[in-house]
Amino acid sequence: MECRRLQILYSGRVQGVGFRYAAKMTARGFDLTGTVRNLADGRVELIAEGEGADLEAFQEAIRESGVGALIKHEAVSWAAAQGGLRGFEIIADI
């Protein structure tokens, strides 16, 4: 199986509501690595690497989680995995 990279830019009411923590807890159920962080423009950026099916299931699990209703839009992009990620981490605010 091919390892891929998924980047999602979430917009809506996604900051200050536990979105990053919910993404990290959701990631525990999947075999993937990644990061999640707030952006200065009010969006949240999620980057994850793993098998395509795991990444798609993870994306759906976030939508179905308690914070899923706060998402107004997802800008999704796929690429080849780059490596270098360890575990699933929340990147602190700037």
Image (spheres, grey):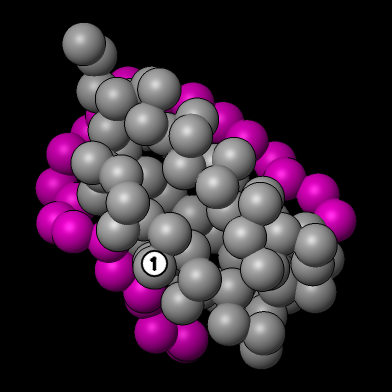
Which residue corresponds to the image point at 42% horizontal and 34% vertical from the top-left?
55
| 71 w.r.t. 59: above or below | below
| 94 w.r.t. 48: above or below | below
* Mark 1 Cα-neighbour bin, 10 Å: few <14, some 14–19, many ≥20: some
Q: Is 49 in front, or is 41?
A: 49
Residue type beneath disc 1 = Lys
Q: Quadrant of the N terminus?
A: top left
Is 84 colored magenta in this rendering? Answer: yes
Residue 88 appears in which quarter of the rendering? bottom left
As helix, strand or loop, the secondary structure at mark 1 comes to: helix
- The answer to whether residue 41 of the structure is visible from this angle is no
Kindly identify which residue carries mark 1. 24
Residue 91 image offset from top left, x and y in percent:
37, 75
Residue 2 image offset from top left, x and y in percent:
24, 14
Q: Is 84 in front, or is 49?
A: 49
Which residue corresponds to the image point at 14% horizontal and 56% vertical from the top-left?
86
Q: Is residue 15 left or right of residue 61?
A: right
Residue 16 image offset from top left, x and y in percent:
66, 88
Residue 33 image offset from top left, x and y in percent:
25, 49
| 41 w.r.t. 56: above or below | below
Residue 30 appears in which quarter of the rendering? top left
Magenta segment boundaries in residue numbering: 72-94
Which residue corresponds to the image point at 39% horizontal and 68% vertical from the top-left?
25
Is 78 colored magenta in this rendering? Answer: yes
Which residue corresponds to the image point at 59% horizontal and 73% vertical from the top-left?
19
- The answer to whether residue 72 of the structure is visible from this angle is yes
Q: Is 33 in front, or is 61?
A: 61
Q: Is residue 69 left or right of residue 47?
A: right
Q: Which residue is outermost to the top?
A: 1
